[in-house]
Amino acid sequence: MDATSRVLMAVLVLVVFGLWVAAQEQEEDWDVGIAEKVLEAKPGVLLTIELPANGARLQGVRFKLPEGTKKVYAQVTDASADIDLWLTRERARDMASLLEEAEAEKATGRLNEVLEVSEGLRGGTCYVYAGSLSATADEEVSFKLLIGLNEAPPPVTLPALPFTSLDQLSPAERAVHACVSLNTNEGGGSGTVVTPGGLILTNRHVLENEDGSFATMVFVSFTRDPRGLPVQTHTAVVIDQSAELDVALLRITEDLNGKPVETPNFAWLPLGQSGPEFGSELRCLGYPAIGGSGSVASITMTSGVVSGFAVRKKVLQWLKTDCLISAGNSGGAALNAKYELIGIPTESLHDPDTLESLGYVRPVSAVPTGMLKRIREELPK
């Protein structure tokens, strides 16, 4: 074998080895792990499931399905993470076999997921697999699971909103109550309720799917206390958006039980009436992933100043800030010293050579006129 052949052989070996390593890493990432022990479930009886840290991310549950059953459902409550559900006739050994065997599945942005099946049912042993594909390896996951037959799932107990009357809240507390966590089937971010009727201002990219399509349903979570996790209570739909400005306007329409919001009275934040000044105080409020110890992040506030402006054609397009904006903050609230909404934290630019970063906030004044008109028409007179 000459020198050229030896070099080509060495390169081929390295390429094959690299592909093998990549395949192993992909398999390791894909195999989230299914608990070896299958739990027995009795329809109508609540089952508490706890998945320890650094263990399996999915739990199998076995139950008997009587002949003639017209409907079966699996309902998750009190979840500490985003729980997904699969129904199978056979026991699954790993994620690949689960996806192959699954006769029905439910994996959306809803934390307390509900899976309902009313077609193709036949008597015998069934399995429900429940767990979180988004939970971190060192995260303890807990939830309750209810299997039901021939009935609709019971309504979820939801807190009354607002948690506290606005006149009893400090400006900072009001901001916490009005800044919401948004979850879609493929991602999420933050948003701010800007009217008591449930209009939410956020970034457009928070609602985009990987294939470029747009989320048709957004799950909304409110925070009562910054020491606790947000509580998912409602769904919202997109009513207006701007790709050019990366801004979107949502409306809260239903609670998690599918009940329309008839007399909305949400905690909301007023818009700043004057433009921010150079060097003035600026706070960013949202739900960055780095701000939580698990897959569900608590609300986080960072502070800085208005570091500068980006103006195009004499129109203010961006507020520059040294305020930290992390992934998940997008769409949240940029606040002035009075805790009024002055912009939408949108992105943070980083220089890999100097390790410097600068945050960019879309000012309220740059929000499309039609969106601002909708907001102002709904504000209390």
Image (cartoon, helix red, strand yellow):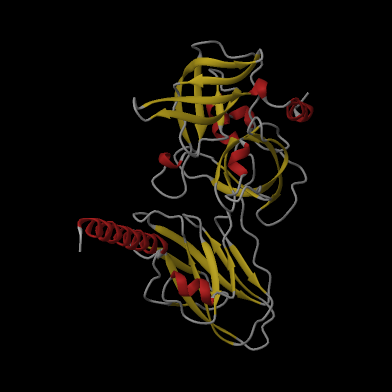
Vertical side of 36 occupied by 208: above or below: above
Q: Which of 2/67 is in front?
A: 2
- The image shows residue 49 at horizontal and vertical percentages of 44, 66
Vertical side of 197 occupied by 229: above or below: below
Q: Quadrant of residue 241?
A: top right
Q: Quadrant of the C terminus?
A: top right
Q: Quadrant of residue 345?
A: top right
Check the image and name the residue furthest to the front: 2
Question: Is residue 366 in view?
Answer: yes
Q: How many marks?
A: 0
Question: What residue do we see at 67% from left, 57% from top?
Answer: 257
Q: Which of 193/57 is in front?
A: 57
Question: What residue do we see at 35% from left, 58% from top?
Answer: 22
- The image shows residue 313 at horizontal and vertical percentages of 66, 15
Q: Quadrant of residue 373?
A: top right
> Left of 141 or right of it: where is 317?
right
- The image shows residue 291 at horizontal and vertical percentages of 42, 39
Vertical side of 86 occupied by 354: above or below: above
Q: Quadrant of the N terminus?
A: bottom left
Question: Is residue 163 in view?
Answer: no
- The image shows residue 130 at horizontal and vertical percentages of 49, 67
